[in-house]
Image (spheres, grey):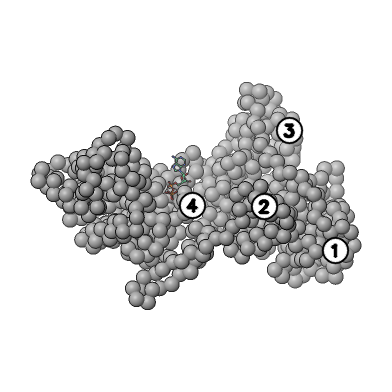
Amino acid sequence: MLRVESISYKVDNRHLLKDVTFSIRKGEMVAILGANGAGKSTLMKMLCREKQPCEGRIVYDAKSLNEYSAKELAGKRATLYQHNTVSLAFTVQEIVLMGRYAKEKDTTEAADQLALKETMEICGISHLAERSMLTLSGGEQQRVHLARVLSQLWDNKEGLLLLDEPVSSMDMLYQHQTLAIANALSKKGFMVVCVLHEINLAAQYADRVIMLKGGRKWWDGAPEEVLTSRNIFTAFGVHSQVQTDPRTLLTQITPNGFKLDASVFNSNLADSNSKRSLKARFISHRDQYPGNPLWRTAQILGVSQAELMFTGLGENVILLRPEMQAILQRIEGLGLVNAVTCNEHCETERVGVYRNLTIDEYTTLFLGEDIDLRIFTDRWKTVLAVEDRGKESLQFFDGCGKALHQIYITGGSYRQAYAELIEEFKHQDQSAPLLEKIVQEQKQEKRDAEIDIRDFHQAWNNMLDTHEFYGLLKRFGLTRTQALRLAPPRRAVQVSLESFRRAILNCSVTEIPIMMFTSNEGCVQINTGKLDNVSINGAWLKFSERSGGETRLNEDAVHSVWHVVKPTADGDVNSLELYGADGSMIAQFFGERKPGIAELQSWKKVLADNLG
Ligand SMILES: Nc1ncnc2c1ncn2[C@@H]1O[C@H](COP(=O)(O)OP(=O)(O)OP(=O)(O)O)[C@@H](O)[C@H]1O
């Protein structure tokens, strides 16, 4: 029996494997499936003990994998790695014989020769025995390495066979032959774990399929249970038809083909009539990937979100005059609407009325009980009224066409007021406005040595309001993550994603009201209140609010989590801040607070109890 007990593996604070648990019995052949980068090879490296898990353990035949000596292990398990390089001119039979030397030497010369003969035969390489490895084709080399691995366990009646993409370079005959050997060995008492990309081969030969996604185990079961078209789409993003062959009762997967426009990979190849072709591409992409958010579709098609929406102008999309302040003053009159703000890794929505509008020099604020927004209207350049698949919305974009905020009409909205607003602000010219070129804002960090740390620490410690933090960054020319890194002692501490989750889950259970900030360059939406539930759907962590609102963030994009303490006139304010690999802010969490009142003790306690 092989037991994998809750193993995790991290590199640079990023989980390559997370909390993976499963067992394999003797006689079982298990296929590990998953998209590129899902963690399959990393898992195999744990199973063969090339790498150690950071958490959890692996038990093989009632003994921790760590307790085996190298020789002892070599006699019980053999591994075919994904990449096998031989840079010296060994002959084929020399390579195969290396499998015999890996194990404890209690075999005879005759056994070695028989093992060599039989494994070379089954792998179809007998005729290559004297050839130098360096002269072989990719598939032939793969067969030689397979023979080497098989020769290592040739004397065994049982053992663990680990095969990482064993058939990736093989032709059809050897693909089937290799997996048939693996399957036959499993039926004799071996445990076989095999990473495969060809899901039909997994369906045909494996007893069980484990599907990984983002380093986590998503599904584990018989091929017919795991290989549903829905699961395949979730794991690989490919639509497919899944059927059971009535003759063999095997699951058969037929992936839908892709139809792409060449301009997807080379914009110079776009049709001259690009608006029409973009529309066609947009529709076909959305049909193929109905779950993709707009920003992702825009990214794949190489355009901005606004450009996608412009394809509907004259049909389901109306361009409004970009009189943002005037339009925003009318939103309260729409009644109950759904406010949506997204960045690439976090999206939030909440139904409410846009109340208490305040306009100051730089910011437009809605400080309503439900809808709490900071809007930087100088960034808001385009506004569209969109009717899309039964939903009506006002959508706001920046000068490059990036979506900043949306207001969706609900059953509780005043439709007449909405219709009047559109009529009043409808642009005379309904052609698509020109957009600025998207510039990737590379926030170049100053060298730490250029920062006056003493002054910076003093300024941080003298803050009277959390809003001063932005001014602080500007004054010292710091990026946010650099400021956190250089913060005064105990003002900013990096914590694990795990402890962040624990803290927020605790807030949900103990009903501590929190504030969740989701922001982009043009808008910050703050959803305040108690959480109803915190759930995980793959990489997405979902915070369901009592109010019915919802915030979803992509955990896989979180590169660092910081516990930040800022002084204010009302005492210290603690926040949890999540950042992406490029230093962009994904989300911020505070305990519920109001100016003039000290922060909630219960929030402080949750952080003290759970971060560490
Ligand atoms: N040493 C490393 N340092 C940083 N990242 C790593 C390291 N090794 C692997 N990774 C990353 O971990 C993730 C999982 O890698 P792994 O090789 O396990 O994927 P896989 O599922 O085998 O993918 P494939 O199908 O492409 O072979 C990938 O995103 C990879 O880039």
Mark 2 to mark 1: distance in Å? 33 Å
For mark 1, what is the residue?
422
Among numbered discs 3 and 1, the one appearing first in the sequence:
1
At mark 2, the secondary structure is: loop
Tell me if 269 is positioned left or right of 465 in this view.
left
Residue 547 falls in image quadrant: bottom right
Circle number at residue 270: 2
At mark 3, the secondary structure is: helix
Mark 3 to mark 2: distance in Å? 41 Å
Circle number at residue 214: 4
For mark 3, what is the residue?
474
- Disc 4 crowd, CA 10 A, few/some/many (<14, 14-19, 20+): many
Q: Residue at x 52, y 62 (%)?
A: 257
Are the residues tagged 3 and 1 within 8 Å (C-beta)?
no
Residue sitting nearer the eye, 216 or 253: 253
- Disc 3 crowd, CA 10 A, few/some/many (<14, 14-19, 20+): few
Q: Residue at x 37, y 65 (%)?
A: 203
Residue 372 screen position, x and y as percent: 75, 54
Quadrant where the N terminus lies?
Answer: bottom left
Residue 370 falls in image quadrant: bottom right
The answer to whether residue 260 shows anywhere in this view is: yes
Circle number at residue 210: none
Mark 3, mark 2: which one is toward the viewer? Answer: 2
Residue 515 screen position, x and y as percent: 67, 51
- Disc 2 crowd, CA 10 A, few/some/many (<14, 14-19, 20+): some
Among numbered discs 2 and 4, the one appearing first in the sequence:
4
